[in-house]
Image: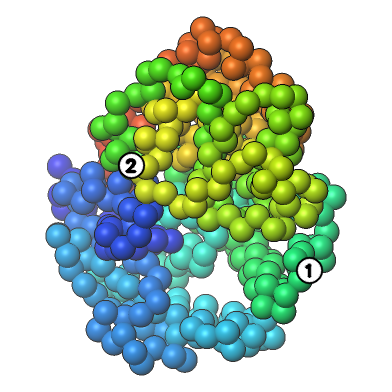
Amino acid sequence: MYSDLRILWFCNTPSRYGATSDKYNGGGWVSSLEEEIASEVNLGVVFMAKESPLDPVNVHGRCSWSADRRNGVSYYPVVNGNDVSRWDRVKTLLRGECRQEEELLACFRDIVFSFKPDVIHVFGSEHLFGLISIHTDVPVVLHIQGILGEYQKVFLPPGVSPLRWLTTPFSPSLFFQRLYTLSKWDARVQREKVILGSVENYLGRTQWDHDCVLRYNPSMRYFHGGEILRPPFYSSEPHSSDPDELTIVSTISEPPYKGMDVLLLAGYLLRERGVKFRWRVFGNITPSFFERISNVSVERSGLTLEGVADAETLCAALRSCTLYVHPSYIDNSPNSVCEAQILGVPVIASNVGGIPSLVNDGVNGLLFPSGDAAALVELVVSLYGAPDFRHSLGEEARRTALSRHDKDRIVKELLSTYAALKEVDD
């Protein structure tokens, strides 16, 4: 029924093209979606690459693309040769990204002309992929991840100035790296406004992302689009019994809005109360900045930083923990929360963004006020002391997540969306 549909994805990751290259399984949930849908449609996948498989050396100073067909999917790695070295970043800071964007959009237009899609599916509004909607008559649907303009409002924890983030701890290379990050965020936020104002069709999954896009684009057309989690979270046995000691798991990343400072404070407050616990924190975290702004070291907090982990390792950690904590200052629908829920782990998460669409407070998890480490600790202690309630939260979380992330339903919804967009275009 859908095999004649030609669908072109624009992705922030290489999806399954790099599925064996890193601990994030190539592209996380995007690669999981590709695995399920690639046999249903004629699929092409565009992504940014550090080098071209056809010309891996001579990339500096130009943007280029190539085509590489694997396992029935047409992949299009695009190389931005204007962003290769540190000097390239200096030039970007000084003169902006206009030239790069023009060259990259030329590559994107050429790929669209070559692949001839019926529908273009863009993942995320944070990169320039969405600008393709201005340069083609092919229907474009933008799959909302986060919304940078909203995230920027709480990029830094309360009371932390940009200058403090730039200089804590101070080193010339770190200062430049963070200055470049702030500059890129500012540019991307402005570009995102253009994208959200020009794309007509959206895929989303929370009340928050629906309401945000509606503010940017009152005439938008909104479709529901779920996310398929990584395979091990479907095949793993669910959480079944509690460890003897309070054991908490969190998965986090480096951006300040992810709330690492909240975890440090919460761990410290738990230790001050004499609570014995093990708190395992997974992710690419360098703690020095968060230690400075919270005045709590990792050692004093009692947290254990375990680095980036693959899906199997996270499954094992979640199955053997007491509860999962998610401290972000902003998020749309974090997969880490969904992964904990589908395993039946009770979740405590900050009441921000789209999280209330995932966590129904008191029914399948608990919510705490953003940044309030003391409130988080109270919930941890009370939930640990109420095993029956804790187990009921976990069971309901698993029931909800199994329905929310049902592969067959998600694929059917997406194929129906593609068909509807093609029909309108015809």
Chosen colour scheme: rainbow
Residue 75 position within the rendered picture, expressed as x and y whole percent measured from the top left = 26, 67
Residue 167 visible in rendering: yes
Tell me, yes or no, whether the two marked residues, 2 and 1, touch with CB atoms within 8 Å.
no
The disc label shown at residue 312, or none: 2
User: Does dot 1 land on a helix, a strand or a loop?
Assistant: helix
Q: Residue at x 61, y 65 (%)?
A: 188
Q: Residues within 10 Å of mark 2 (few under 14, many from 20)?
A: some
Q: Amino acid at mark 2?
A: Glu
Tell me if residue 133 comes above or below residue 228 in the rendering: below
Q: Quadrant of residue 326?
A: top right
Q: Amino acid at mark 1?
A: Thr
Residue 425 position within the rendered picture, expressed as x and y whole percent measured from the top left = 34, 53
Q: Residue at x 34, y 24 (%)?
A: 238
Q: Residue at x 59, y 28 (%)?
A: 277
Q: Quadrant of the N terminus?
A: top left
User: Does dot 2 land on a helix, a strand or a loop?
Assistant: helix
Looking at this view, is 165 or 422 the one in front? 165
Q: Which residue is mark 1?
A: 167
Inter-mark Cα distance, 2 to 1: 37 Å
The disc label shown at residue 314, or none: none
Q: Residue at x 56, y 52 (%)?
A: 253
